[in-house]
Image (cartoon, grey):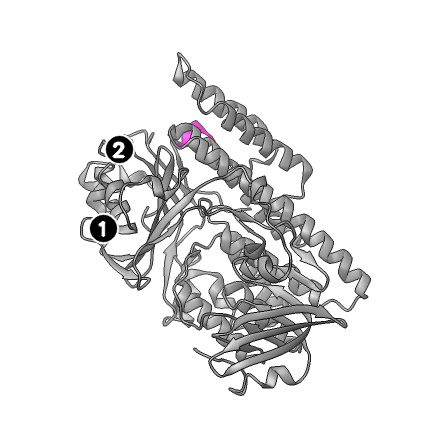
Amino acid sequence: MPMLDTDHDPVTFTRKPLDVLIAGSGCGGSLLAWILASQGMRVAMIDPQPHPRFAIGESSTPVADMILADLAARYRLPKLAPLAQYGTWCQVYPQLRRGRKRGFSYFFHAPGKAFQPSPSHTTELLVAASSDDFHCDTHWYRADVDAFLAEAAVEAGAGCIAPATPRQCRYARDRWQVVVETPAGDLAFRSRFLVDASAGRFGTRFLQAGDRTDLLLSRSGAVYTHLRNVRPWRALLENWGAHCQDHPFDCDAAALHHVFPGGWMWQLRFDHGVTSLGVACESSPAALPGAGGCEKIRSFLAQYPSIAAQCEQAQLVDPPGGWVIVERLQRRAARATGTAWAALPSAFAFIDPLHSTGIAHTLSGVERLARILLSTGTDSTQVEQLEQYERQLVSEVALVDELVSAAYANTGNFSRFIAATMLYFTAAIQYECRRKQGLQEQAFLCADDPELFHRLRAACCYLRETASRSDANQRESIENGWDRVRQWIEPYNTVGLLDRDMRNMYRHTVAR
């Protein structure tokens, strides 16, 4: 989809000043462009890469679905609405590749040992996020979805110029002046407002957004790719005599997590037979033996025979270069807004894919920035709104960082990892409940609720600080830990999280 725009002439968007120029045409940037253009704004996107293209960040959540549905209704975008649930997506857009996601599934592995199922499910955790297959969440095959959203933005009147590599960017005379290099030559844009929808690179280079990654608690790297012929985990469990009849949903129709000391593997299945698979670990992927991604994954699988059995016939699909290695996933800018510019959450910061927060957080940023940019208030009002938006992003990133770091600190003990994971579900369910009540201007995951934030942070600190303690009676220590965490979340625990009678099988966590 190269050089997309409304009349196939990118020069059109250089002749008059734009209302908004968006640096990046991924799912967030394209959706924002679609909304703004549909409301009559003059908008263009610039991106170094054309569509379609490989990308991860594919696991949606109930929160993401809620925001999509609300955006479709608010801005009268009927083409967007079917993406808010798996069933309508399949009916209306069968050509857009996707996967079924009923919830989250987790399985604990000890190094050098086969997976050990038990009737009490002590090495398993399944958390339902939907009541049935039709109304469930969706894994986004990003090459298709991003291209679809960019095309929809163009149909609404936005420009999409790609490939276009930014060369110059400065703010003068109340306008942004941006020069990009394209195969057809340089293009110069003028714009009243600028949005960073990149992966942070644009803000670092051109907006003096700064770098405060040092403030983050989490530290992890990853090796990932897309594969075919990854065996269904449920089939292996059944062969090993696991009690799969207790599962509230098919564990493969989920964001599947293989948890091991120091990290985890994700598996997201798409309906066309491809699986997004990656290993994230606390230490840098460089610590895994081997020169390249394929060798590093082989050395990892040698430690975990059950996962190795699942992947023994797997074949690389994309990206063309094979496995992608990221030495550190975390990044955080010092600023999310400035004079006539703002960053989407994904451009401001990224923590880790552990809790599938990426798509929902991005959509929440799109929702808020669209509201601000379409507001008819004064310039001073917009400045105040942007300052509030930045404060919210800072608190949201801090909360996600707390939740992720507490979970990583306890990957070596699955019961404690479950306790840490329930803190995320507490925040997510609260956010869903409040959105259902019409509270759509709150911070993502209710990060601006001081009482909830305090309780979650206190529980995270406790779980991190006690993670490495050796206790003579480990069982008693774990039970006390569950009790303490349950006390912290008790005022917000509306679905019975950390209920021992559930035996780690949660059938009903949908916000009521």
Say which label, 1 or 2, has the lower sequence index. Answer: 2
Q: Tell me, yes or no, whether the two marked residues, 1 and 2, touch with CB atoms within 8 Å.
A: no
Query: To which quarter of the image does residue 363 belong?
Result: bottom right
Which one is in front in this view, the residue at disc 1 or the one at disc 2?
1
Q: Is residue 165 visible?
A: yes
The numbered disc on residue 386 is none
Assess disc 2: are there few (<14), some (14-19) or many (≥20) residues with their C-alpha within 10 Å of its C-alpha.
some
Q: Which residue is mark 1?
A: 231
Boundaries of the magenta span: 498-502
- Front in this rendered view, residue 500 or 107: 107
The residue drawn where x is 57% and y is 80% is 187
Give the vertical position of 208 relative to 449 (above or below).
below
Q: Quadrant of residue 448?
A: top right
Relative to 112, say whether 221 is above or below. below
Tell me if mark 1 has few (under 14), some (14-19) or many (20+) residues whose alpha carbon lies within 10 angstroms of its own.
some
Residue 198 included in the magenta stretch of the image: no
Give the secondary structure at mark 1.
Answer: loop
The image quadrant that residue 197 belongs to is: bottom right
Q: Nearer the viewer, residue 441 or 325?
A: 325
Residue 496 visible: no
In the image, residue 256 sits, relative to residue 169, either above or below, namely above
Residue shown at the point (51%, 24%) measured from the top left: 465
Q: Of 354 and 442, which appears nearest the observer?
A: 354
Mark on residue 117?
2
Residue 8 in picture, x, y percent from top left? 51, 86
